[in-house]
Every structure is written in C-alpha cells, then in structure tokens.
Amino acid sequence: MDPATTEPGIRQLLWRSAEPFWFAFRSVLESPLRPESRVYWLFLLSSLAIALGIYLRIRSRKGGSKDSPSGMLGGFVNFCFPSSIWQTSSAWLDVRYFFFHRTVMTILTPIVSTATFLPILMTQTASWVGGFFESPPLAGDPSPAMVAFYALGFILITDFAAYATHWLQHKVPFLWEFHKVHHSAPVMHPLTNFREHPIDNVLYIWVFLVTGGIGIACIAGLMGVDPRNIDFLRTTVFVFIFNFTAYQLRHSHIWLAWPPWLGRIFGSPANHQIHHSCEERHVNKNFGFMFAIWDWIFGTLHLPREREHFRIGLSDGTEAEYDSLARLYGLPFEKVYQMFASKLKRTRGA
C-alpha cells in the first residue's frame, strides 16, 4: 500500500471522527451570540447592570460615594469577582466543566430529543380535547390574545413539570445521586448553572417533550387549531424576559430578593441561592424555576425577608468528592450502582 495515499486517508478519517466534537465545541464558544442561550451577551450585560445597581446601593450605604472612578471600578470588579470564590478550585472546575459538558450535550441533545411519536400524540390529544369541549375549528390565524393565552399556558405547564421533576430529584434516591452534581459546588458563579449531570439533562428533555407536547395539544384543542401549525417562537418572549431579569445572579453570591408579594409569584435569584443552602431551614425549599407559585402552593417556599447568610453545597459535606470532570460524570453512576447492589444484597439476605 502506498504510504502517500494512506496518510491522507487516515487524516480524513481522524477529521471525520473529530468533526462532530469540533462543531459542538465551536457552538459552545458561540453561545454568547445566540439569544436562545442562557449566556447570551444581552443576558450577561443585563445581570451585570443589575449587579452594578446593587453595588452602588451597598456602596452608598457604607459612605463610599466619594471614591474616585478608578476606585469605584476596582470595587465593582471585586464585588462581582471576589477572591473568596475565584481562588477556589471549584470555581475553575465549573469553567472547565461548562465547555466540556456543553460540548457533550450539544451532540447528545438532538439524539435524545428525537421523538417521532410526539406529532401523532399532539394531534390526537388536540382532537380529543377539541371534541370533548366541542371547540369549533378556527378559521384563519389565531388572534394575538389567543397566542398570548397559548404561550402563557405552555409556560405554566412546562414550568410546573420542571418543578415536579426537580422535587423528585431531591426525593428519589437514585435521581438525587445524579442531581447532587449540581449541588456539589461549594461556591457559585453563573457557569455553576451548567454543573449538571447528563442524566439530569436527558430527564428534563424528555419531561419537557412529553408534558410540553401534551400541554400544547390541549391548549390547541381548546383554541380549535392544529397544534402542528402553532408558532412556537412566540412563547420565547416569556423566556427572554425571564433570562433578562437577573437570571445570571441565581448562581452567584450577589443577593437579590423580590418584594414578598412578587416573590410568591416569580422566583428571585435569592430564592434559588437559598435552594443551594445546606442549612436545615432551607433544605428541600424553593424548587421552582420561573414561577415560585408552585412552591407557595405546595408548601416548599422559603421567602427571604432580609439578607441571609448560609453555607452552600451538600448537607453531608461530601462536596470535595466531586473534584474533577471525570468524577462529576462518573461518581453518580458509581454511587447508584452501590445503592442498588446494597439493596439487592439485603434482599437476598432476607
């Protein structure tokens, strides 16, 4: 065999093998440029602007209003990026994990999201709901009011599904082992949001596909339209607003709580920081994502009345076990295996 023809063939094979990973990694690098990404530059900028407002308020209370511009800028940088967080190995592990994990999930998501049964399920559900309520077929396009009703209904259904799934992740032992990855961070910054196990991500994808699909179909049946013809993009305005209003501060040290009346409806950054607390009064509280009404209804809401201080991480103090990319991915499988092996052993010994 001619080495001159073999070498290009090997290079081509290696490139074809690496190509999906390269394009996935490039997609992650481009995340700040895409509005559907939670690290879209406008969301980062809005959270930074809100953080600046919080900093200036704290600074004025401490009598620092006479600082020079350079002193104020330096103080703001230290406020946003304190050494107490960025000198920890966990903070930099989250940076590495963001690029690694998002690359993996960019490849994996289209695979696990393939649900050929969903259009059939949606159409049949819409037909059944429409027949049950005797909804007449809609002539023409839905009105703006109908679209708004659909969008809000869709958001409420999927957000409740997320709340219920999150509650199960904390209550079902083997699901908790995978969800512990997210709670294993002893310090938080915005990229800690992506410290999630792939099993967690796949679970939410399937939950959103099924509940979202059925929810869309039910609303479409009431509206008298074919669910396959609804413009899904119109629902993103709610998500955009949510991500724009200080979403990046949810996983951070910067305290921002809504007034009590608003905090019972929408989850604030402080609400989610409390969810990561190890304090007994905070355990199994604030499971909500966009809305806090589910926590309020089901008695899992801890509404902060003032600035609270607490340790974050795992209540059993095992955060140090999750100290590498390999451990973040592999340790949950190991612990789940040990859990089921122990139960099997006890069952056989009974």
Image (spheres, helix red, strand yellow):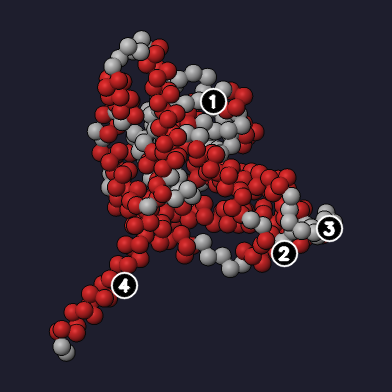
Of the numbered discs in the image, which one, if any, rests on residue 124? 2
Where does label 1 land, which residue? 258
The numbered mark, 3 or 2, whose residue comes first in the sequence reads 2
Does residue 326 appear left or right of residue 174 in this picture? left
The numbered mark, 4 or 1, whose residue comes first in the sequence reads 4
Viewer can see residue 317: no
Where does label 3 land, which residue? 136
Inter-mark Cα distance, 1 to 2: 42 Å
Which one is nearer the viewer's eye here, 133 or 59?
59
Label 2 near label 4: C-beta < 8 Å? no
The numbered mark, 3 or 1, whose residue comes first in the sequence reads 3
Residue at 74 percent of width and 58 percent of height: 225
Inter-mark Cα distance, 4 to 2: 41 Å
Does residue 20 appear left or right of residue 222 in this picture? left
The numbered mark, 3 or 4, whose residue comes first in the sequence reads 4
Q: Secondary structure at mark 3?
A: loop
- Type of amino acid under label 1: Trp
Where does label 4 land, which residue? 16
- Type of amino acid under label 4: Arg
Q: Secondary structure at mark 1?
A: loop
Inter-mark Cα distance, 4 to 1: 50 Å
Of badges 3 and 2, the one in the foreground is: 3
Of badges 4 and 2, the one in the foreground is: 4
What residue occupies the far top of the structure in this picture?
A: 63
Does residue 326 appear left or right of residue 182 in this picture? left
What x and y, as percent, mark residue 224?
78, 57
Q: Secondary structure at mark 4?
A: helix
